[in-house]
Image: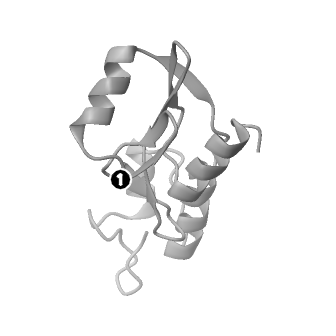
Amino acid sequence: TLHPDTGLTWYYGETLSECQVEYPDAEEMTVTEFCEWKAAQQRTPIEWKPTTRERFWEMLECLPPAAFIGAAFLVGEPFDHNALTGAPRFQAFRQRGDVYECGSRPMTAAEFRVEIKTGGEA
């Protein structure tokens, strides 16, 4: 994002052209546009990927879970926050029989409830 008074980036004081030397895809946008873009990146479909029993238990025991439903939980500290709403997003884990899985991306507590209720078939 560019400072409205200087036309330079907020953090490095560079022009858009200077940014594009290191980041060719960089483009000028408002903070609102950036937050909308970022939120769209955060809403990718959730897939459940295999993990190990050891990793599942390590994540369960590192902090009290942020949410716990059956044999599924959200790790107790947010991974990041939704770019539009500010809602915290957490890494999710679940156990189904002898299968241990991890969510492919962080999710909000509301997304987690839907995922667990529907088995990922929302």
Q: Residue at x 55, y 22 (%)?
A: 49
Q: Relative to residue 112, is residue 51 drawn left or right?
A: left
Identify the image quadrant of the N terminus: bottom left
Residue 116 x/y as whole percent: 62, 41
Q: Amino acid at mark 1?
A: Pro
Residue 34 x/y as whole percent: 54, 65
Residue on which the image places disc 1: 78
Q: Residue at x 49, y 33 (%)?
A: 71
Q: Relative to residue 21, is residue 50 drawn left or right?
A: right
Hey, which residue is sitting farthest right in the picture?
121
Identify the image quadrant of the C terminus: top right
Between 28 and 105, which is closer to the camera in this rendering? Answer: 105
| On screen, residue 103 above or below 15 | above
Q: Residue at x 47, y 65 (%)?
A: 87
Q: Residue at x 59, y 70 (%)?
A: 33
| On screen, residue 57 above or below 4 | above
Residue 108 x/y as whole percent: 52, 55
Between 31 and 21, which is closer to the camera in this rendering? Answer: 31
